[in-house]
Structures are given as C-alpha cells and as structure tokens.
Image (spheres, grey):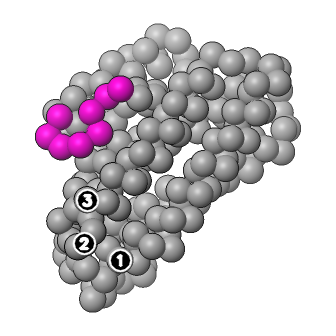
Amino acid sequence: MATVDPGNQHDLISVILEDHRAVELIFAELMAGAGTPQDRRDLADHLTTELVRHSVAEEMYMYPAARKALPDGDKVADHEIEEHAEVERLLQDLEGVAATDRAFDDLIAKLATEVQHHIGEEESTLLPRLQQACDADDLLELGRKVTRAKASAPTRPHPSAPDKPPLNLILAPGTGMIDKLRDALTGRNRD
C-alpha cells in the first residue's frame, strides 16, 4: 500500500482530486445561473477547457497505470474512457450555444450529471485502488506527468481523437497547441 504525504499536492491522487473540486465549483456557479450571458458563456468555455485537459491527462497517464497495476485494469480504463467520450460529445454540443438559449442550461445540467457520476466512481473505486496498487514514488511521478500533460493538452473537445497510448501521447500536444492558438485568436479563455 502506498503511503502518500497528504500535504503533497503533486501525487496523482491529489492532482485528480484538486481537479475534481475545481470542476465542481465551476458547475455550482453555472447552475446558480448568475452573471451576464457573456459571463456564463465564458465560464462554460472555461469548464470545457478544464474538463478536456483533465480527461486527456487521465487518458495519457492514469488509465494506462490502471491497466498495468489492476487485475481488471483494462475493463476499468475502458469504462472510464467511455464516460469521457460521452462528456466530450456533450461539450462539443455546448460549443457555440448561447447562454441565453434554453439548450445551454439543459446541456450544463446533463454535463453536471455525467461528470458527477464519473467523479463519484473515480473517487470511490479507482483512486483508492490505484493508491493501494502503486507505490508512493509511482504516484508522485504520475502526478507530475498528469500536471505536465494538462499544460499542453487540448482545450476544446475532440471526440474522435485517439484516447489511448501511443497515439494520444503523440497527437494531444499538437492538438493542444492548435487549440490554444484558436483560443488566442477568438479571445476564448482570457485570464
């Protein structure tokens, strides 16, 4: 069983949990319905960026680790990737929908349900199992890899992009660079 310093924010478990909490806060703000339509559209774009980067990083490093470390790792990883695909389809549907359109709130509600289900499964099953199966050094290295992958990951949904190594490891950084260029040109995700 891995012993991870809970104060260390760079191990895999901490990185994933931190992402989950950040996404939940964005959903809470969106579901509250406050802000101008442009504020809500910008927040939905920010949510998209965070979910896509998180998913890509998990697919690059966490799910391959699960395949290797868990006896049923292939089944677990394939299930998680299927859930990511559904979320990406919903994110793609959300792109370009005005915050004043009824479909916007409907899509946000569907996304919230899908993502909360996914988070619940990961936190109650997958993460504890990985924490037991991997040693602390492996979890620290995976946390570093996931953090680095998020920095170069795509910022927009690409449901047909490869979601398993080696192709996702090769293509995701290039797609991320193109997405960031598109974001800069359109003013999306200004911080």
As drawn, the label of residue 129 is 1
Secondary element at tag 2 = loop
Amino acid of disc 2: Leu
Give the crowd class for mark 2: few <14, some 14-19, many >=20 residues within 10 Å.
some
In the displayed image of the protein, which residue is found farthest to the top? Answer: 185
Side of 109 relative to 69 (left or right): right
Residue 77 can be seen in this image = yes
Secondary element at tag 1 = helix
Query: Marks 2/3: CA distance?
Result: 8 Å
Give the crowd class for mark 1: few <14, some 14-19, many >=20 residues within 10 Å.
some
> What residue span does the magenta drawing correspond to?
160-167
Image coordinates of residue 10 in percent, x first then y, are 34, 66
Side of 30 relative to 8 (left or right): right
Residue labelled with disc 2: 70
Q: Is residue 163 magenta?
A: yes
Amino acid of disc 3: Asp
Query: Marks 3/1: CA distance?
Result: 14 Å
Residue 144 can be seen in this image = no
Check if mark 2's residue and mark 1's residue have beta carbons within 8 Å: yes
Give the crowd class for mark 3: few <14, some 14-19, many >=20 residues within 10 Å.
some
As drawn, the label of residue 74 is 3
Could you say which quadrant of the image residue 151 lies in? top left
Q: Which residue is depicted at the point 40% across and 26% down?
A: 158
Query: Marks 2/1: CA distance?
Result: 8 Å
Could you say which quadrant of the image residue 46 lies in? top right
Q: Which residue is depicted at the point 53% across and 39% down?
A: 87
Amino acid of disc 1: Arg
Q: Is residue 159 magenta?
A: no
Q: Nearer the viewer, mark 3 or mark 1?
A: 3
- Quadrant holding the C terminus: top right
Q: Earlier in the sequence, mark 2 or mark 1?
A: 2
